[in-house]
Amino acid sequence: ISTSGIERVEDYLRQSFAERARNPRQMWVLANWACLAADNLEVEQLGLEAVSDARARAWTEYANACRVVEKLEEAEASLTTASKHVALGSHAPLLLARQSDVYASLLRTLGKNEEASLVLERVEHVYRTAGDLHLAGRALVKRGIVERYRGNPSFACKLFEQGIALLD
């Protein structure tokens, strides 16, 4: 089975990620290209699970890029699309955690900090269970930021300390 189509999606996502701080608009464009490439993958050739996972990943990252360029309604719609693909895919814990991580970031952007904190608590648990301590630490730091916005500075500091200790 050729995975060149999936590799193209992953390449667009890598490029998009690389542009996140330097050029957010280009991040958004490249994530959009990843969605277009993913949506053109052939299920008959690659299988429903692999195609669904690639589409879920692309739409999740596109949602994040939309959030970064302040297209918040489009970010919400893109996460809904990603969820539809997740339901058809492998249900890989790290893919689900990434989608939840992006959802938490969107919630934070929308000022829904209590919900964001709860989602990040689950994200941290999934990453820790999967053995990815760096991503677990990142989730703890993000949760610390959210808790600071919620007016819980001492709890935020505790989360920062725990998270930073896990970062690579």
Image (spheres, rainbow, N blue to C red):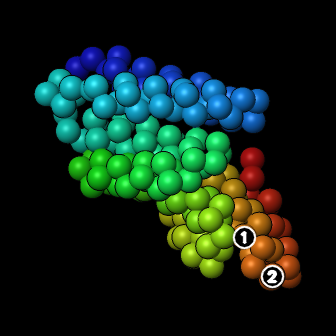
| Quarter of the rendering occupied by the N terminus | top left
Q: Residue at x 37, y 25 (%)?
A: 37
Amino acid type indicated by mark 2: Gly
Q: Position of residue 9 (x, y in %)?
A: 43, 26
For the residue labelled by badge 1, is the local secondary structure a helix, a strand or a loop? Answer: helix
Q: Residue at x 63, y 53 (%)?
A: 135
Q: Position of residue 66 (x, y in %)?
A: 56, 44
Amino acid type indicated by mark 1: Val
Task: Answer few, some or many: residues within 10 Å of disc 1's Cα (few below 14, many 20 plus, some between 14 and 19).
Answer: many
Q: Residue at x 85, y 74 (%)?
A: 157
142 up-or-down from 47: above or below: below
For the residue labelled by badge 2, is the local secondary structure a helix, a strand or a loop? Answer: loop
Number of labelled discs? 2
Instruction: Tell me if I can see residue 133 in this picture.
Output: no
N-term mark: 2 or 1: 1
101 up-or-down from 112: above or below: above
Q: Is residue 51 left or right of residue 34?
A: left
Q: Is residue 38 left or right of residue 63?
A: left
Q: Position of residue 129 (x, y in %)?
A: 51, 63
Taking depth in this image into account, of 36 and 85 the one nearest to the observer is 36
Instruction: Tell me if I can see residue 126 in this picture.
Output: yes
Q: Residue at x 48, y 48 (%)?
A: 74
Taking depth in this image into account, of 128 and 66 the one nearest to the observer is 66
Q: Which mark is residue 146?
A: 1
Taking depth in this image into account, of 104 and 50 the one nearest to the observer is 104
Task: Answer few, some or many: residues within 10 Å of disc 2's Cα (few below 14, many 20 plus, some between 14 and 19).
Answer: few
Taking depth in this image into account, of 133 and 85 the one nearest to the observer is 85
> Disc 2 marks which residue?
151
Q: Position of residue 124 (x, y in %)?
A: 59, 65
Q: Is residue 9 left or right of residue 67?
A: left
